[in-house]
Image (cartoon, rainbow, N blue to C red):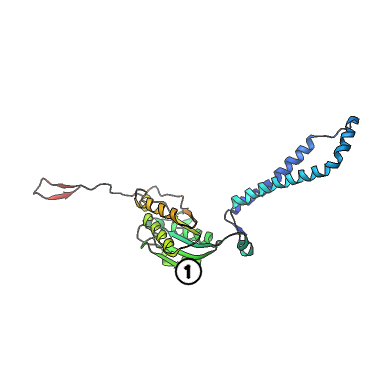
Amino acid sequence: MSFLQPLILVALPLIGLPILIHLINQWRYQTKPWGAMQFLLAANRMNRGFARIRQWLILAMRTLVVAGLIFAVARPLASGLLGFAAGTVTDTTVVIMDRSPSMLQAGIGGETKLEAAHRQIGDALSKLKSNHWVAIDSASGEAASFDSLEAMMDSPAMLPSSTSSDFPVLMQSALDYLQANSSGQTEVWICSDLRAADWNAESGNWSVVRQGFQALPQTVRFHLLTYPSIAEENIGLRVSEVRRAASTESGNVENA
């Protein structure tokens, strides 16, 4: 078994808190002999064993709750026989890798955003099992299916491109593939540096894509892998309006 967030496991010593609280409560009360209470103690002696068992069961349940919470936050991934018995294998894994020029900017350690995304998505998906691997080419928008994770990660769909990404179109391509192939349980992994021009939040295609995914019969889970560092010197241009006006000189027509 492996974990997507293994650092969370350092909190495992916290499972000792219920035991510590139990011991503190035990130390708070001291037994004092009292003649009038001897008859009551004799009457309760028969039930003392059951009460002690009940206390230990309550303590064990409290400890399991803390341990379960820690393991849940660490996001365990079962493999082998345990994974086959306790979990379900993803039928289709779709990867949308942003390969636009902005992803070629060097970040910490001289590693480009695309290189970091390629490495991290490969590490994450290597811990998962999937029957089908699909990559959506961010340049052409076409979906390509692969027999293995290694083949997908080495494909041209993961290499740099001079073409900008249009995520409404890419998400529509992923939706079209899932609808055409009647895929089962699906996971969609998206790698992007969240450039506004690439996502085009004002596009009307988003509502169509959202309704399409909601109408799918299978479960679809989305994962977004983003690059937190944004270059402040980057400048983007967007044309919001174009007007055509007649010039006063020589009757020419010019665009404004």
Picture coordinates of residue 112, whole percent (x, y): 44, 57
Label 1, residues with CA under 10 Å away: few <14, some 14-19, many ≥20: few
Taking depth in this image into account, of 66 and 58 the one nearest to the observer is 58
Q: Quadrant of the N terminus?
A: bottom right
User: Which quarter of the figure has residue 18?
Assistant: top right
**In the image shown, does 232 or 86 lie closer to the viewer?**
86
**Residue 84 quadrant:** bottom right
- Residue occupying the far right of the picture: 35
Secondary structure category for the residue under label 1: helix
Foreground of the two, 6 or 169: 169
Is 248 on the left-hand or right-hand side of 235?
A: left
Q: Which residue is mark 1?
A: 151
Q: How many marks?
A: 1
The amino acid at mark 1 is Ala
Residue at 83%, 41% (x, y): give it. 47
Q: Is residue 218 left or right of residue 246?
A: right
Q: Nearer the viewer, residue 216 or 10?
A: 216
Q: Position of residue 147 (x, y in %)?
A: 49, 69
- Residue 77 locus on image (x, y percent): 59, 58
Could you tell me residue 4's position as x and y percent? 57, 55
In this picture, is 43 found above or below 105?
above
* 240 to 105, vertically: above or below: above
